[in-house]
Image: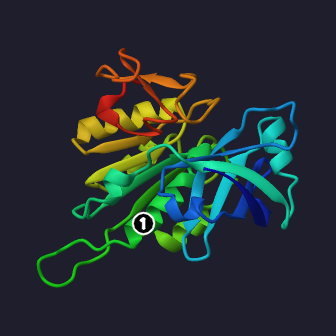
Amino acid sequence: MKKECIINEVGKLSDDVFMLNIHAPGIADEAVPGQFVSVYTRDEAHLLPRPISICDIDKYERNITLVYRVVGYGTKEFSRLIPGNHITIMGPLGNGFEAVIGEDNYRSPILIGGGIGIPPMLALAKSFREKTVPNGLDDGDSPFVTVVLGYRDRHTFLKERFEEICDEVLISTDDGSVGTKGTVIDALEASGIKGDIICACGPMPMLKGVKNYGMEQKIPTYISMEERMACGIGACLGCVCETVDVDDHSKVNNARICKDGPVFDATEIQL
């Protein structure tokens, strides 16, 4: 659904990472962690919307939070918005982590985010914290939630929010300025923490490493794919990824990231 929404709050999280909190009735009501929205610019010369993952969902206030990196005209325009401005959004779009959220038996989920793949892990972390896992003795306990966050440098945006929600927060940075120097897998292996499910979002090299780690450890792994999108609804076939099985829609080994994903079982995707 395409809606005119109102900006509640804006924020600058680092030199090039910004936040928008948006009053979005309907979208917030239906959204689940892992989904995204398409955000439209005001310039009619730029017709295509910008896909942005949903960082947080407040169903009571009917708000969503978007965190994005300024990389071009559209996101630069969004960074100049102020509270009270109207913004056009279509969503929620895609398939999120519904299958994971609906499962009650995961006791030690590991969430992994890299770069601008970090924000959607926040809504998922909150969903896990709100669950209870049956333990056979009483009504159950909340899962032990570990999050591994990969940054380029010391600008660790959203780190404090994750620390409020998660039981364990691990950090890796490319330059070693914070946490473990190296990859998210380096940070995870250094911690010795073992989980019973992995959920990840980030750049392709990171997702390849996460998939391989999950296979080696025999842990179910779900990944959220990042890709440039045009229509955002699966019509243009501009954001396909290679799959193990033949897709019913295209009749080839492809899936539409915007429509069939962005979240996939890692075993179903060729990386």
The spot of residue 113 in percent (x, y) is 51, 48
At 36% from the left and 28% from the top, the residue drawn is 269
Q: For this rendering, which residue is in front, 175 or 253?
A: 253
- Assign the C terminus to one quadrant of the image: top left
Residue under label 1: 127
At 47% from the left and 57% from the top, the residue drawn is 32
The spot of residue 198 in percent (x, y) is 35, 49
Position of residue 51 relative to residue 139, above or below, is above
Position of residue 222 relative to residue 82, above or below, is above
Observer able to see residue 75: yes
The spot of residue 19 in percent (x, y) is 72, 58
Q: Is residue 130 left or right of residue 68?
A: left
Label 1: state its secondary structure.
helix
Observer able to see residue 176: no
* Residue positioned most to the top: 252
Q: For this rendering, which residue is in front, 262 or 208?
A: 262
Q: Is residue 57 left or right of residue 70?
A: left
Callout 1: 10 Å neighbours few (<14), some, many (20+)?
A: some
Q: For this rendering, which residue is in front, 122 or 260?
A: 260
Q: Quadrant of residue 27?
A: bottom right
Q: How is this picture coloured? A: rainbow
Q: Quadrant of residue 28?
A: bottom right
Q: Is residue 138 left or right of residue 121?
A: left
